[in-house]
Image (cartoon, rainbow, N blue to C red):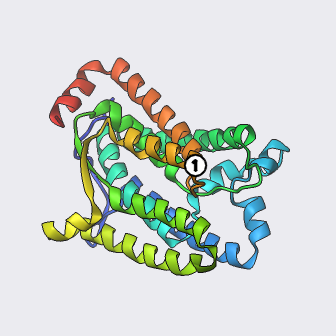
Amino acid sequence: MAEVYSISPKRRSIFGFNFNLSTKLIFLNIILSCIGFVLLRTSPEFFSKYVALTPFLILSGNSIWTFLTSMFVHANFFHLFANMFSLFFIGNFLERIIGKTRFFWVYIVSGLIGGVFFVLASLIFGGVDIPAVGASGAIFGLLGVLAILVPWSRVYLIVGPLILLILDSVLEKIFPASATIWSTIITILIFFMIFAMISFNPRLRRFAIPLQLPMWLLPIIAIIPLLIIGYFVPLPIGNSAHIGGLIIGLIYGFYLRKKFPQKTERIRNLFK
C-alpha cells in the first residue's frame, strides 16, 4: 500500500509538463484517434470491423479484440476533446489518490466491461449493427471510484454542452435537410462553452451553465437524464457503456474502502 493514496507522487517532467499515466493515456487516445479518423474516412468498413466495437460481429464470435481497440479511438474531434478533457481532470485526480498501477487497471477493466454492457444492451434493445468507440466507459469507471472515495468533493458538471447535444439530435430528426448546418453551429457553441468554463472570467463561465455537485451525485446526473431522454429521442451516446464502467468503478471503490478503511477515511475527510 506504499504507492496507493500518495497525494503527491513523483512524476517525470519534460519542459515543466508532467507525464503521469493519465497524460500518457491522453496522448495515446489522441494518436490512435487521429489514425481512426483517417480509417473512418478512407475505409469505414475496415474501421467498423477491426477498430470499432460492433455488437453483431462480437456476437458472431469475431473481432473480439475491438473491446480494447474501441476504447482508444473516437468518432470525431469533439468526441475526442470531450473525453480527454474529462480524463485530464478526473484521471489526474484519481491517479494521485490510488497510484498509477491501480489507476491503470481500473481504467482498462472499466472500459472493457463498458463494452460488454454495450453489446448486451444492443442485443436486448436492438442496434447490433451500430458500432461504438470512445473512452467514456473507462472514464465513468474512474468517476465511480471517486464517487466512493471522495463523495463530498465538489466538482462542476458543464450542463450547456449536454443540452446542446440533445438539441442537435432533436433538430436532426425534425430538420434532416439542414442537419449539417445545425451541427456546425452547435459544435461551435459547445467549444465556446468549454473554453468559457476554463477561463478566468466568471461572467463568461455562466454561458457554459456550470452546475456544482458533490462527486457522488455527478455520475447520477450524467447518466439518468440522458437515459430518460434517449428513450424518446435517439442520442449518439452509449449510456450502457457508461453504466458498465461506472459499476466497475463503484465496486472497486467499495473494495478499497473495505480493505483500507483508515486510509480511505482520511482521504474522504481530506476532500470534504
Residue 250, relative to residue 154: is it above or below? above
Q: State how many labels appear.
A: 1
Q: Residue 140, image x and y in percent?
A: 45, 44
Q: Quadrant of residue 200?
A: bottom left
Q: Quadrant of the N terminus?
A: top left
Mark 1 falls on what kind of element? helix
| Rendered residue at 71%/44% (across/down) | 122
Which residue sits furthest right? 60
Q: Is residue 23 visible to us here?
A: no
Q: How many residues crowd mark 1 within 10 Å: few (<14), some (14–19), many (20+)?
A: few
Q: Residue 78, image x and y in percent?
A: 48, 69
Q: Quadrant of residue 218?
A: top left
Asked whether, in this view, residue 181 is left or right of residue 57, the answer is left
Q: Which residue does the numbered mark 1 point to in the structure image?
A: 232
| Rendered residue at 28%/19% (across/down) | 261
Asked whether, in this view, residue 136 is left or right of residue 149, the answer is right
Q: Residue 266, image x and y in percent?
A: 19, 27
| Rendered residue at 25%/65% (across/down) | 197
| Rendered residue at 77%/54% (across/down) | 129
Which residue sits furthest front? 174
For badge 1, the amino acid type reads Phe
Q: Residue 45, image x and y in percent?
A: 79, 68
